[in-house]
Image (cartoon, rainbow, N blue to C red):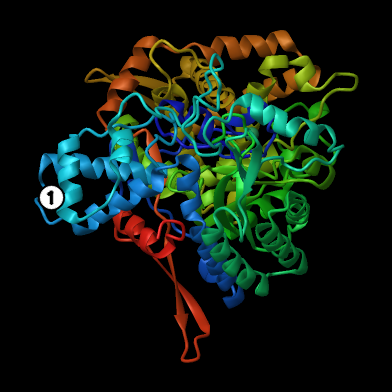
Amino acid sequence: MTMKHFIISGFLLAGILASCGGPKEAEGNDAADTVDSIAYTPLQTDQIEKFADLQILQYDIPGFHQLSLDQKKLVYYLYEAGLSGRDMIWDQNYIHNLEIRNALEHIVANYSGDTADANWQQFMTYTNRVWFSNGIHHHYSMDKFVPDFSREYFDGLLSETGATLTATVVDKMFDNTADMKRVSLDGSKDLILGSACNFYGDNITQEDVDNFYAERMAAAGNHPVEFGLNSRLVKDEDGNVTEEIWKADGMYGGSITEVVKWLKLAEGVAENDEQGKALGLLVEYYETGDLEKWSEYNITWSQATEGDIDFIQGFVEVYGDPVGMRGTYESIIQITDFDASERMAVLAENVQYFEDNSSIMDEHKKAEVVGVSYKVVNIAGEAGDASPATPIGVNLPNSNWIRAEHGSKSVSLGNIVMAYSNAGGEGILREFANDEDEIERSIKYGEIGSKMHTAMHEVIGHASGQINEGIGTPKETLKNYSSTLEEARADLVALYFLLDDKIVELGLVESTDVGKTEYDDYIRNGMMVQMRRLEPGAVIEEAHMRNRQLVASWAFEKGQAENVVERIERDGKSYYEIHDYDKLRVIFGDLLREIQRIKSEGDFEAGKALVENYGVQVDSDLHQQVLDRSASLNIAPYNGFVNPILTPVMDEDGNITDILLSQPESFQAQMLYYAENYGFLSH
Ligand code: ZN
């Protein structure tokens, strides 16, 4: 499943960028950590487009130039396969989406009027929103957006540009009572009848679905396929219910045939046998629509862990279906993050040093500690459900028995995380940092500080420490406080060693100034900045946010007598200034020692007191101040991405000799290009 289906940078970002386990944690996803360090509040990316509540970012593909030619080809073929299936999600989301999109795109391409006209601008905002959401319903809220321009204006555009759209469909666009919710989860009504998505034909009810699958499921045994994943369910006039299968010679055949063409090319340049076998099974599945093949593919894919390139491709996540059966089309192409892997490898090799030199009590140290492995990848292209809005981490396959018997893969999408992190902009840093030195140092070292924090948190933080004999697991002893305390413990290991000369000696950072920057960012975030994600009047619920405030405010209080960290008031605004980094390090070490003790001894009362006293309640005046200061920065709540462009270079014989990378001119340019080149269902 995806860690956070969609990313939001506003209030809800809280549980997302945060995440050991991601925001889906509560649903039992124990995926690896995603980004535990968001303290870094970094720079403005050079190009950000904004409309309505959305902003469009770019991402780079670090490591692409390190790939061999065959690896680049593999990425390119998978990238093309991904985009070739793009039309499917539009149709899955709503039955009229493709017609509407075609009309909007025809208008955009042929309009010759005044682009400064207010009506036109509203039309473009609407069109951008439709592109962003792969349809006329908001990608996150699922609500239909009704145009702000008039029907008369739109009819005029249609006739001026020669675009065609039936009156019935235009009615649907402007009607603010019809098809209002793409996915309704209002259990008081029939979920399927109440949802506008196109996974079910007319008049199909939840009861029809139950009846259709009940016997099949009962007969499936211990290794069931993902029933209904690759089909639309329809009912004929006589009440017979059947599946319209999405496969090469079935529904969506136009797109699937193209996807298959590229997947076969990818198979030809696979990095290893296992990966090639997985691609072959995926092709067979698309050709036959056989869900047993999909299971076989997932088993093979789960075990194909050797390559530098990986991919997610198919009808995968089921959040778009109100009854959670049908998979929305998705493609994500990943390249190993070589820098992150190197960093983690160095930490893992030296993990015993960190354990031996930790501030925790000797009796809680592991004699032989093993670093936790953690996988970071960089995205090289996304389509369907993952684009333009993208997850930041993915844990697949979804089938429980395959996960249990054959394993699963969990990755953090490094370049996406970094782009998000950057999207907050220099604005946040400048608004909340106390002085120019702090800002400059954060600009210089913030990114590496944040990456080091994440690597240390994961590899040495979670690995550290042992529980006393006879004490139960933290979930048993510390109960609902266990996650917050575990995240705090891992953060504190990272913070404690960020000022240790050892990481300079290991060549991981150029100086301990990196650590000082991370201290600034951590305190600023934990005391103030993260509160911008809370609604007024709210308390902190999410484990990572709790842990960060706990660590920051405990350290602030313990250092008060010696003025280690000072709260400064200036022009009605609050700032935090660290006066003594070495003393702050000692304080972090003391808290680490105490939280390790709590975990090792299973001291529920002490753990509860720490979390409740330092991690939950917010200072409502300061919170309001943070909200006001953030609002003035005008940061859109939802982010999405354009994909970098991959262009093959050919020799005279038509052989690919290289793949070039570039960024699109604009979101609009990319959307129009996609429509032109990947419209396999609509043309
Ligand atoms: Zn963690």
Q: Is residue 629 left or right of residue 221?
A: left
Numbered disc 1: secondary structure: loop
Is residue 422 shown to the viewer in this render? Answer: no
Residue 644: where, in percent of width, then height? 42, 60
Q: In the figure, is residue 399 to the left or right of 13?
A: right
Displayed quadrant of residue 191: top right
**What residue is at 62 percent from the left and 69 percent from the top?**
266
Find residue 327 and report its horizontal and vertical position in percent.
60, 42
Quickly name the residue at label 1: 115
Residue at 45% from the left image edge and 80% from the top image edge: 649
Residue 2's quadrant in the figure? top right
Amino acid type for the residue under numbered disc 1: Thr
Q: Quadrant of the C terminus?
A: bottom left
Quadrant in the picture for the N terminus: top right
Could you say which is closer to the camera, residue 184 or residue 517?
Answer: 184
Cβ of mark 1 under 8 Å from ligand 1: the answer is: no
Q: Residue at x 50, y 30 (%)?
A: 183
Where 411 falls versus 362 (above or below)? below
Query: From the viewer's perspective, is residue 544 above or below residue 4?
Result: above
Identify which residue, 498 or 168, lies in the foreground. 168
Q: Residues within 10 Å of mark 1 (few under 14, many from 20)?
A: few
- Relative to 158, say whether 149 is above or below: above
- Residue 621 image offset from top left, x and y in percent: 34, 11
Taking the image in four quarters, ligand 1 sits in the one at top right
Query: Residue 304, percent across and down?
Result: 74, 58
> Number of callouts in the render?
1
Q: In the orientation shown, which residue stands out farthest toward the bottom?
A: 652
Residue 645 appears in view:
yes
Residue extending farthest right: 470
- Vertical placement of residue 202 versus 114, above or below: above
